[in-house]
Image (cartoon, grey):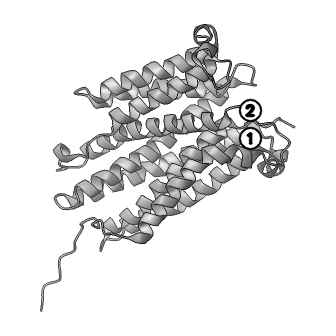
Amino acid sequence: MPAPAPVSHRAPRRRPSVGRAVAVLVLVAVAALIPLFGPSMALDGTGEAQAPGTGGITFLRTVLFAALSVQSGEVFAARLARRVPGAPLGRLPRGWSSYAAWAGCAAALGLAAIVANGNLVPRELADLDIGRLYDTRDGRLALVEVNAFIVAALCARSRRPSSAALPLAAVIVAEALRAHPPVEDSPLVGSGLTLVHLTCGALWAGGLLYVLRTLRRWRTTSPEEGVAVLGLYARVAAVLLAAITATGVCSTLRRMPPGTVVDQLTGTAYGRTLLAKVLLVAVVAVLALSARHRLRRTTDPVSAYVPARAEVAVLGLVVVVSALLTAVPVPIRW
């Protein structure tokens, strides 16, 4: 009786694919066009006025959120990898944290410049009033984000890159406080919801990116360990998705009373952007379930790499739409 053929757990090698290249180009183009045309499309026909510089603010917040996700995801995923017995920790993928932190710092500086000009995009250096950064709440929060990203960049180059978790947490806290000014009803509740929502979203997107890079890096030398890291991530991601969903629903009901949600989802820029985000997250959830199902298949668990790769691509779009959501007008409570 012939012996059964050994099962290969190697991750699929990269092969030239026109379809894959076209899909990547389309996703990049869509992500680039959202800051340019997203605000006007979301506001079209709503009767709401577009604030000056909304496109630029959307772009800067996209960079800031992406930088936050990449670095926090690396810290998170590297910790997961250390929990796998026999994992070749010396062959982890090269970190992008330093580059991400400096990109986040540049975006935070751009947003701070807007605050220094009275929440308007400055046209020249003379427009900037540095005193606003120290005299206003938004200005102080903007400075916290700039300094936190600088510290995170230094941590990324240190012997303990995981120490970047503290300055990154400061960025998240600053963003949560900025999104809910004191004039809002129960602003601390809103800030708490945003804190959990943004933290889980950054870990989900950035963590998956680094886990997939790890799986590809180990595909020939330690494929089983790579699959184990992906499995650990999948279990944590289920909790992250639940937290994102719960906080998202609560935040929506705070912005839109239950009786007005349906009308505002199509009649306001905030509602339309939120609806687009919900649809994208639903796609991500389906891809995540597909990857989790494939992980449970003992014959070829590494096939989960395919839907997981699509998942991280769609998560990139979610980051851009989330940035747009912070730039469009907040709906008026009816």
The image shows residue 312, relative to residue 326, as above or below, that is below
The image shows residue 153, relative to residue 276, as above or below, that is above
Please state which of residues 99 and 303 is positioned toward the viewer in this rendering: 99
The structure residue drawn at horizontal position 24% and vertical position 54%, both measured from the top left corner, is 217
- Horizontal arrangement in the rendering, residue 117 relative to residue 170 (left or right): right
- Horizontal arrangement in the rendering, residue 225 relative to residue 47 (left or right): left
Q: Which mark is residue 253?
A: 1
The structure residue drawn at horizontal position 73% and vertical position 42%, both measured from the top left corner, is 270
- Horizontal arrangement in the rendering, residue 30 relative to residue 292 (left or right): right
Residue 2 placement: quadrant: bottom left
Quarter of the picture holding the N terminus: bottom left
On the image, numbered disc 2 is attached to which residue?
51
Near mark 1 (Cα within 10 A), the count class, few <14, some 14-19 or many ≥20, is some
**SS for tag 2?**
loop
The structure residue drawn at horizontal position 51% and vertical position 57%, both measured from the top left corner, is 27
Residue 165, percent from left and from top? 38, 29
